[in-house]
Image (cartoon, rainbow, N blue to C red):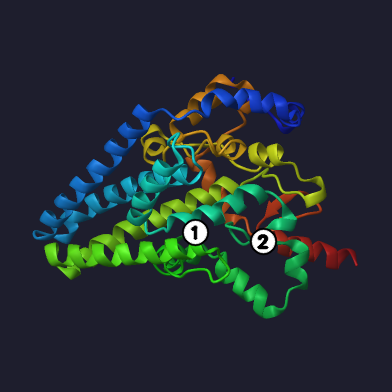
Amino acid sequence: MEQFMTQENTKPFLTNKAAWKQAIAPYQRPNLRRSLWQIANTLIPYALLWVIMVLTMRVSFWLTLPFIVLAAGFLVRTFIIFHDCGHGAYFANRRVNEIVGFITGVLVFTPYFSWRHGHALHHASSGDLDRRGAGDIWMMTVEEYLTAPAWKRFVYRVYRNPVVLFIIAPVFLFVIVERIPNRYGKQRERRSVILADVTLLLVAILMSLLIGFKTYIILQVLAMGLAATAGVWLFYVQHQYEGVYWQRHGDWDYAMAAVEGSSFYKLPKVLQWFTGNIGFHHIHHLSPRIPNYNLEQCHNENPQFQVAPITLRDSFKSLHFRLWDEANNRLISFRQFRQMQAQTTAAA
């Protein structure tokens, strides 16, 4: 029977900063050949899929649909490259990371410097109950929900509805929100949004002239929409699952939050490929400087990182989680919340 590490087993190791830093160090070095090969086997097929989608659209939309789904998969993989560049993990040279990050960022409708800043805040505060709100999914504690006004509870319930969270919100985020500069951001971050928007506009004009505005919009919106939904789902499952780590800032520990507060999402090999090994999210959070193609090796060669995985089937249980029960250190559903309230009322 396969054995996995528990929190009790990993804690002594993770609280020894020198030990876990030594363990991850060999995997933090990017490999130029592997990075270039990954770019080639991602962007070239994606470009070819656009040719196929345009040609099949002239015959039938239904003939095109499978290729749109496949294109969305390559967009998810493109985002992983963009993501690694944002962490400075993909190339040894900072400037090259920025150039490739900008190009792939345009492809996934995400401004490089603006996103990089927000995502760094997420890594610095993940699992910290007192520092929520930086690049994460809105999560209320039971106490916060109980004391919130009716309008806020209603908004929260709408926000956490799966249709809103995984269909409406992803498209709104990547198509609308990422187009707006943050007035509180630094000048470079605001400029990156404007530069990305101008580039996307030029791309849209060029593609409309080449293949027609209607064809471009249909293909781009559907492929991007599916990719965005998949991306938000991955991000959700990586931080909203049974047994996840959340602590108040005084008790919060970076390494524990990384390994216990980020899931090992064990996907079928084909999905693991399309998602760029991001299922090894616990290792990624421990060291964002590890390129995606080294994550699995780091996991396999270090038993102390081999925590119990979440399978594709198991991950759908996360759909029910809505609130953090701070008294019992667990995520609960609204049904469990109502049961707790009924028990409290009966006891009173």
Instruction: Note whether 235 is above or below 6 in the view shown.
Output: below
Image coordinates for residue 16, horizontal then vertical, percent: 75, 28
First of labels 2, 1 by sequence position: 1
Toward the viewer: 98 or 246?
A: 98
Crowding near the residue tagged with mark 2, few <14, some 14–19, many ≥20 C-alpha atoms within 10 Å: few
- For disc 2, the marked residue is 335
The residue at the far right in this view is 348
Query: Any mark on residue 172, and which?
Result: none
Residue at 14% x, 57% y: name it: 54
Crowding near the residue tagged with mark 1, few <14, some 14–19, many ≥20 C-alpha atoms within 10 Å: many
Residue at 75% x, 57% y: name it: 130
Q: Amino acid at mark 1?
A: Ser
Residue at 47% x, 34% y: name it: 291
Residue 17 lies left or right of residue 30; in this view the side is right
Toward the viewer: 174 or 343?
A: 174
| Circle 2 SS class | helix
